[in-house]
Image (cartoon, rainbow, N blue to C red):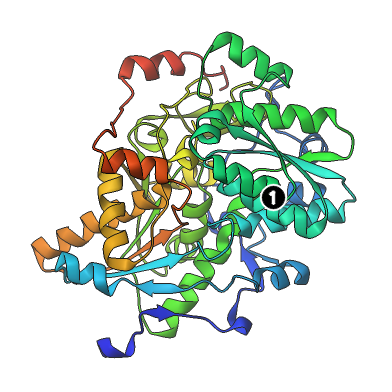
Amino acid sequence: MEEKKIPYKIYLEEEEMPKEWYNVRADMKNKPAPLLNPETKQPMTAEELGAIFCDELVKQEMDDTTAYIPIPEEIRNFYKMYRPSPLVRAYCLEEKLQTPAKIYYKFEGNNTSGSHKLNSAIAQAYYAKQQGLKGVTTETGAGQWGTALSMACAYLDLDCKVYMVKVSYEQKPFRKEVMRTYGANVTPSPSTTTEIGKKILERHPGTTGSLGCAISEAVEVASNTPGYRYVLGSVMNQVLLHQSVIGLETKAALDKYGIEPDIIIGCAGGGSNLGGLISPFMGEKLRGEKNYRFIAVEPESCPSFTRGKYAYDFCDTGMVCPLQKMYTLGSNFIPSASHAGGLRYHGMSSTLSQLYADGLMEATTVSQTQVFEAAQMFAKVEGILPAPESSHAIRVAIDEAMKCKETGEEKTIVFGLTGTGYFDMVAYGKYNDGVMSDYVPTDEELEKSFALLPDVE
């Protein structure tokens, strides 16, 4: 197909939007290990999980066999307000790099939350409403998930309580105000409003917090408040399922023009956007139909895949949530106060962890200054100010494109542009002022955290 026939932006028609989510676990030979009860160390039952999560979400969490799960019409109608999202050919970036590589990005920032998080937020809020609940609690790192859930709850008239990681709460005050505008109650975490928050502050006085801390507080409040359940924006199987709309749309757009990617790249914190982007492509690889190269990109300051242990661990710092087998830095590990708040989680999705352990995908790390260098270049030539999280994928997409320049290979690269960075100006300011620093945890720090991993065979 001639180059000129591929537009800058490939849009799907409304009727081409996915009507079903794709469950990659159905095609996995080695299924993700089950969640364990933290007290008995036995696999969690649906009844036990139902005390924390909405009933329908528990079914989705535990379903390892159903490949396609219908998207309710009410959710599809909500999706139509901002989906399908465009697949963009980065012609200007290609020109800047003078690379023979073809670069595409799936842009998920075209909604008020500024990210892909709304794809799962509306689904989780919908099932909470269907169950007759009064409200939900959650955590948020950079704020995109909290914003998305606030929007979804406002749309469905549900109460929303958000525990926001303290460092992001302080760095991104306007993100907090967007949540409040949608009616959410926002508390910096760790806080003195919960018993777990108080204990964390005693053990780590002056801490900037982490997603693990905020999860603990949100779960405590949900467990102790009648008519509430806990929902979350990453890590869990249910979230990767909802986010598969990203990959399904990406694949449909590529197929429309006969484009086959060689490399698919996503940033990796807990795994929601990466899992959503790669899932249908990974399904083809699992079925032996195609052989794509998948790259997970994580910050050097929080390297779960690349330096973590593949073991059962608590999903939260307060050690009250189920145990999950995943690549983890230890639930007691609190990452440095990097500006990619959405990637500051100690563990990785059990689904992605199993795929990584089976050698079906790669992982790499990049430093904070490298990330912002790539973000600035992208902003200058592509006209979008990317989120720090997304910019991890941009960094490695550029690096892979430059390898193509060295070898002369015409590879096709696809990456996920998960959201915009307009609430991240403190971070951009530090980069522009030349005062941004890089932090890499020492082996000693990690070993100290690994020593506290639960003893589970």
What kind of residue is marked 1? Thr
Where disc 1 sits, the SS reads helix
In the image: residue 255, left or right of residue 77? left
In the image: residue 346, left or right of residue 400? right
Q: In percent of the image, x 37 and y 50: which residue is there?
A: 361
**Displayed quadrant of residue 92:** bottom left
Q: Is residue 398 above or below residue 168?
A: below
Q: Residues within 10 Å of mark 1 (few under 14, many from 20)?
A: some
Name the spot of residue 211 as percent of width and height, x first.
56, 32
Q: In percent of the image, x 73 and y 21: which residue is there?
A: 194
Q: In percent of the image, x 45 and y 60: which residue is there?
A: 282
**Displayed quadrant of residue 386:** bottom left
Name the spot of residue 36 as percent of width and height, x first.
67, 30
| Viewer-proximal residue among 442 and 177 | 177
Q: Is residue 330 visible?
A: yes
Circle 1 residue: 181
| Viewer-proximal residue among 196 and 18 | 196
